[in-house]
Structures are given as C-alpha cells and as structure tokens.
Amino acid sequence: MDTKVDAQSQDPDLRGLAEAKLAELSWAEPATAADVETSRLIHELRVHQIELEMQNEELGRSRDEVEEGLREYSHLYDAAPVGYVTLTRDGTVERANLTAAHLLAVERGRLKDKRLGAFVGAEERAAFNAFVERVLDTGMPDERDLVFPKADGSTRWIRLTMTPSDDGRTGLASMLDVTERVRARETLAREHTILKAAESAAHIGSWRLHLASGAVEWSEEMYRIFGLGPRGSDGHAFDITAFIHPDDRATFEDASAATLRDGLVRPMEYRVIRADGEMRWVSAGGVQETGEGGTVVALTGFVEDITERKRGQETLLAANEHLADVLKSITATMGKVVETRDPYTQGHQLGVAKLGRQICEEMGLPETEIGSIEMAALVHDIGKLSVPTEILTKPGTLSAVEFALIKEHSLTGYQILKDVDFGWPIADVILQHHERMDGTGYPNGLVGDEISQAARVIAVADVVEAMASYRPYRPALGIELAAAEIKGHPEKYDPQVAGAFLRLYEAGSIDL
C-alpha cells in the first residue's frame, strides 16, 4: 500500500480560504527549476500554517461560547430569588450569591472566607455549627430556621436548607427569609389555643378532629388555604376530604388511617381544590391525642400551602434543564470543531454519543449519568486537534511515529478539558476511553475497575462506530464485524457494557 503523505489539506473549503489569504500576500516568481520545487514546498507550508491559524480562530470562538455559557450560569446564580452559600464543615463561606449577601447586609467580597456563624444570633451558633456538621456527616439534606440579628437591633429569621456535596467536604445552603412566616406563626399560636397540640409540627393552618363526636375545628389559616374566608360561610369547619384532588384522595385517606391506627406522623404533600376552583399544593401531617388510659380521643394536624414553593422548584428545575441544554450544545460544538479537520470521520463523535446512550439505557443507568456519558462522548476525540490533518486523513498505513502521535490524543484531550467544570469528570473519561480491561489499552495501561464505567461504555461505542463506518484507509466493515470484535474479545471490554451492546445488536436496535 502506498504510504506517501499528501501534503495538501483534505478540506477543500479550508484549503480554498487559505489559498485566498496567501494570494493576498506578495510572492516572488522562482528563477530556476530547483527554485520552483522549493517554492512549491514553501507554498504548501504557508497554506498549512494559514489553515492552522484559521482552525485556532475557530477554537477560540468555541472557547468564547463556553465562557459565555458559564457567564449565563453565574448570572442565574446571582439573580436567584433565594440566597445561596457554599459552606465548609466549620461554616466558612466559600461562595455566595448576591441575594445571600443582601440578606446578610454585607458586601459579597467581605462575605467570602468568613464564617456564617458570625452572622447568626449568639444563642444559636452552637446549634448552627451542629446542624452543618450533621448534614455533612450523615450526607442527608436538612433545613433549620435561624435568627440573624440586624444592625438596627431587630432580627431576621432565615430558613437554611443545606444539601451536602458528593465528597462531603462542603454543602450548598439556600437562604430564604421566613421572618414574616415565623412572626405569623407565633401570633397564631398566641391567639388560638387549638394550635398548642400541634406546635411541634410547625404548621401554618391547623385542624383538630374529635373522634367521639366527629366535630372538626379549623384555625383561621385553614379557611384561607381552602379559599373559604374566615370561619367559613356558615361558621363551621368543613370536611377536608371534600377539597382534596380526586387523584390524591386515596393517599390522603390511607395516611389518615395510619395516623389513627398507630399514631405515626405521616407528612405528605397533596393537591387541594379551593372553593373558587383554584388548585393549590399543600403539605400536611397529623398526630394522635390520647386521653386517660392511653385512649385516642382526637387527631390534630397541620396544613401548609406550598404552592409557591412548588412553582419555585419547577422554575429552578426548568432553569437547570436549560443550563444543561446549553452546556450540551457547547460541548457538541467543541466536538464539531475536531471533526472539521477530518472529513472522513465527521459525525463519529455524535454516533458514539448516540450508541453510548443506547447502551446506557439498556444497562439501566440513571439519566443523570447517561447525560454525562453522552456529553463526554461528544468530545472524546477533542485531543485530535493536536494531530496534523495529513496524519488524520492519511489513506495508507501509519508509521510507528505517526501512530504514536495519534495515541497522544487521549492525554491531549484531558489537558484541554481538565480545568473545565462540567460537574462530572469528563476529562478523566476522555483520558481513559482507549484503555482496555486487560491492561492492553493506552495511555496508562489501566486494568479492570481502574477504568471508569463511563470510559468503558465509550470504549465499546467507539470501536463499534469506527468499524461500522468508512475510513480513508478502508471501507466500512459493517456492524456484523463490529459485533464480532466485541463478542470475540471479552478480555478487553467490560462484560456488562458488551452484553448490553450485544443484546441491542441481536434485537436489531442499533442504528448508526
């Protein structure tokens, strides 16, 4: 096979633009035949240099798009209607948004590296510190209302809802001003003795059912939640079951029966249909009241309107999904930059991402993990930006030196993306996607569980897509030979990943 390298670009559009730019420069005609050959070589080198410069410009534009996406994320973070702070174990603020700084009445720059406990009321600092440590130790989200003294001597109640990071080193805490809610709850507790039995439930609206008589008492807030006005139109409480959404009624009745039977508090969320027809979300729970001899005499419970909280959660979820779409789009654009240098493999990374998703779904992986693997697949060959185009598109057999350059793309891709915070170790996956289970892969010869599951998925998808597609040095081998490669080398590929792929292949579900 002829191994001569064609020095000209394989991308006619790029070559044409480079030639046009070079034509704008002054050029002396060669004097002799030898000069003609030298001139031709110099010409090719100059065209190649211009092509590289144009590709670098395109990469710069892609980098600008990534940075713009990060700026949009930062804007949404700062513009959030609630405060956000990232806390270490000792309560030190590593990061805060503008809303958090506003709640604490301090400049954000002065808030960083300062302990949040310094802003909490002195009598609650120990409880705050214990709260942070408990969340990080248990790995479970939790929330707590805390008093934050203000400069004018008044106090502000802030609900701190904290979720630990995956590594347990820090936690993300939201800060919601609940001062008015706390004051209303305290006022309601003073005015209505009915709330005494339910004070520990921290409710907004409360009710009490007398089991002997069947009489129901409601607090003022209950009437507001159900849109009935003060005390209802006839001065009596209503049967709460009549207002519950039909789809939630059975769940509500089961929870009520459990409370009556064994006294367990079963907090639950359900929908209610107000008297005016509006649907609202509420959170509710109940406890038993016992009389002499331990006999259950009543049920007492609370109902809190959480409609706005639900809407806020939906808005935040939509914003997060939008950011994920933006990040995926940027990642796909980065992948396309790579493929513009190699027209024979255009669509390869997209094909690997598509097949990788099919394999992940067949394996039953969670969607969050599938999305991250798909994103890594879209840029798994980004390191080929450092490989000369003539090597990527060479129709003949590669020399040992050329193949060594190709093999560098995994490490180069890692170096390019290692400082980009995707929220998932995509750079590590790119570094490992040519590793094999038996240690025969590269660049580090990893073995078995040393290779991440994501890299194992991409390894199989990469091999299959490459074998099934056309390459400059061979025609497409077809999906059948690709399946035979995976099936015939169980020592190289993860058995779960290979098994999922082969099931899809045998079912005729592979569409490359």
Image (spheres, rainbow, N blue to C red):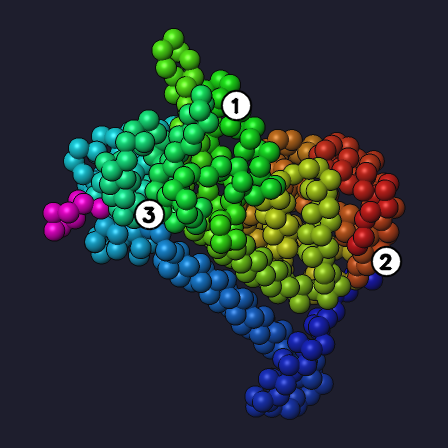
Q: How many marks?
A: 3
Which residue is denoted by mark 2 in the rendering? 475
Say above or below: 349 vs 212: below
Disc 3 or disc 1, which is closer to the eye? Answer: 1
Which residue of the protein is positioned furthest toward the top in this rendering?
Answer: 293
| Kind of residue indicated by mark 1 | Ala
Q: Which residue is drawn at 73% across and 66% down?
A: 343
Which element is circle 1 on? helix
Residue 345 colored magenta? no
The residue nearer to you, when weighing 114 against 210, is 210
- Horizontally, residue 216 falls left or right of residue 42, namely left
Which residue is denoted by mark 1 in the rendering? 258
In three-dimensional space, the C-alpha distance between marks 2 and 3, rounded to whole angstroms, equals 62 Å
Q: Residue at x 71, y 37 (%)?
A: 363
Q: Can residue 364 be seen in this view?
A: yes
Disc 1 or disc 2, which is closer to the eye? Answer: 1
- Horizontally, residue 489 falls left or right of residue 130, namely right
Tell me which label, 2 or 3, sits earlier in the chain.
3
Which residue is denoted by mark 3 in the rendering? 176
Q: Where is residue 227 in the image (x, y as percent from the top left)?
A: 43, 50
| Kind of residue indicated by mark 2 | Pro
Question: Magenta segment range?
Answer: 149-157
Which element is circle 2 on? loop
Q: Residue at x 22, y 30 (%)?
A: 126
